[in-house]
Amino acid sequence: MNDILKSITEKKAKLDRYRPLPHELVKSLEDWFRVELTYTSNAIEGNTLSRQETALVVEKGITVEGKSLIEHQEAINHSVAYDFIRTLVTKSREELKEEAILNIHKIILTRIDDDNAGRYRAVPVRIAGSTVVMPSAVKVPDLMKVYAKWLVSPNDDHIVKIASDAHYKLVSIHPFVDGNGRTARLLLNLLLMQEGYPPALIRKEDRRKYITSIERGQLGGSLEDYYNVIIEAVERSLDIYLDMLEPKTEQKGNTGILLKIGELAKQSGEQVSTIRYWTIEGLLDVSDHSKGGYKLYDPSMIDHAKKIRSLQSEKRLTIEEIKAEIQKII
């Protein structure tokens, strides 16, 4: 674990050397993480809104046909909760109070379960499909006082381990009727962001590994897999930042110099978040990866991106329709 944390510390130091970061870059990344964290955190809990649908709900206030009102509210609430924890980033970990955790949870369940929003559970809970026995409801208030005291106590551990432990301890107390995971992940990211780290991105496809690793620890097993999931999530986010800040070219392809995502975005007139989204959706091809694992694009993707934008804005095609049009061009 120490070797992996050393690698993360080195990447964080590299990121710090670029500070202060350009305002436009910070705004672009904050907007992207706000949607991406909302999508992934809710998806882990079973929300069926896609990444694009989440963006429409959060950024445009658009209602998505065929999706429940609760799923819409979950997206809205998480994005608001993310904005809330960002207001706490300037505070130190030692200044965090139990009230902050309750406030995060209150936002998460607003207009979904107002009776329990921001309140500790008064009933026993079990996790479907798990044999883990959660603490009795009568013990929760005292357990949370102990937890809150631990959270602000001096701790020489690496901040990634402290944040990981904070998340694990909170979900293991399971103080709320619902919303424990989302609240714990937001707290995890608040602690990281207070120390200058980007928020950890636990992907939807990591759900099984993530949940299983927590349960293994709760049943008395090793937490090694759990720590690895969180560390990978932190490193993934650091790479996203560095991908946009590192020198723009590292290798050459058949058509010449390959571009990093930031340069492709700049030359195509798009936001980096848009290029990343189009890549995820399969609209843009990644030609190679740098030694550091960063995506590299052939310069031909510049015109490709402009074509995608044209199909979206002029013909108002959906992603699937654009894919079909792109295939015709290829």
Image (tube, rainbow, N blue to C red):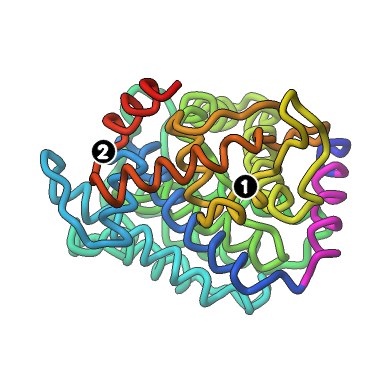
Local SS, label 1: helix
The stretch drawn in magenta includes residue 17: yes
Image vertical order of residue 16 relative to residue 97, above or below: above
Q: Amino acid at mark 1?
A: Leu
Q: Amino acid at mark 2?
A: Thr
What is the spatial separation of the Cα atoms under label 1 and label 2, in whole angstroms? 22 Å
Kindly tell me whether residue 227 is visible in this rendering: no
Query: For the magenta stretch, what is the residue range?
Result: 6-19
Residue under the image location 46 percent in, 39 percent down: 278
The stretch drawn in magenta includes residue 315: no
Residue under the image location 28 percent in, 53 percent down: 56
Q: Residue 122: image x %, image y %?
A: 27, 55
Please rate how many residues cluster around mark 1, counting C-alpha atoms within 10 Å: few if below 14, some from 14 to 19, many from 20: many
Please rate how many residues cluster around mark 2, counting C-alpha atoms within 10 Å: few if below 14, some from 14 to 19, many from 20: few
Image vertical order of residue 43 relative to residue 33, above or below: above
- Of 283 and 116, which appears nearest the observer? 283
- Of 180 and 232, which appears nearest the observer? 232
